Amino acid sequence: MRLFAALLPPDDVCRELGSVVDELRRQPGADGMRWTGRPGWHFTLAFYGEVDDGLVPALSERLERAARRTEPFPLAVRGGGQFGHGKALWAGAGAEGDLATLRLLAERAEAAGRKAGVPMGEHRRYKAHLTVARSRAAGDVRAFLDTLAGFTGRTWTVRELCLVRSHLPASGVAGEQPRYEAVGRWALGGAG
């Protein structure tokens, strides 16, 4: 299974961000981007890649422990950025939220994978992002970034850590999006 740990924003937050993404999609050059679908919007905490089925129970147990050890915290979608000279366009997490706890939860999710025996590759500094578009080629995305810079969504309380399975699209089908399925959900702070 292709898995990652993530935070899933509530529907109303996705609707707010969706209004800005709709604006981005009307800008010149937008037709050269592959825009991600709202049902798939998430903040990845740790990417595990292809995980052997036999490791999933240990990974789930360790993620549950990470969730229990992390209290619920505020988060807001704000601004944006790009990776790979415009190959990925993303919305970020704003200072209105508790970014220190967000980074701590990301570190715990990565550690959960390592301790469960998932080959994690090299450690990278966590950068909170929610991917809104991708492109095969590098490009000038300054106009998109300028639009995202002015966006601040409402602050919500993160109460859950999810283990998500991604189903990649069939090769060659135009416009097909990856599908995401939450295969594990754990309340932060052990509540609920």
Image (cartoon, rainbow, N blue to C red):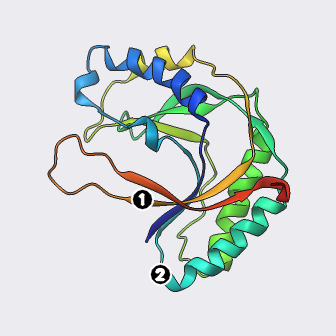
Q: Is residue 106 above or below residue 99?
A: below
User: Relative to residue 35, is residue 69 drawn left or right?
Assistant: right
Compared with 71, 118 (above or below) is below
Nearer to me, 146 or 70:
70
* Residue 90 placement, left or right of 106: left
Residue 61 position, x and y percent, is: 70, 75
Q: Position of residue 124 (x, y in %)?
A: 59, 57
Q: Which mark is residue 20?
A: none
Q: CA distance from mark 2 to mark 1?
A: 14 Å
Residue 137 occupies quadrant: top left
* Secondary structure category for the residue under label 1: strand
Tell me, for residue 52, which label it has, or none.
Answer: 2
Tell me where residue 16 sits by quadrant: top right
Identify the residue at image location x=79%, y=37%. Answer: 98
Neighbor class of circle 1 (other Cα within 10 Å; few <14, some 14-19, many 20+) is some
The image quadrant where one finds the N terminus is bottom left
Q: Are marks 2 and 1 in contact (CB under 8 Å)?
A: no
Taking the spot 63% from the left edge, 52% from the top edge, the residue there is: 125
Q: Which is nearer the N-term, disc 2 or disc 1?
A: 2
Q: Residue at x 75, y 39 (%)?
A: 99
Q: Quadrant of the C terminus?
A: bottom right
Disc 1: which residue: 166
Q: Amino acid at mark 1?
A: Ser
**Residue at the limit of the structure toward the front, as seen here:** 192
**Horizontal side of residue 45 vs 34, given as left or right:** right
User: Which amino acid type corresponds to the residue marked 2 in the rendered image?
Assistant: Asp
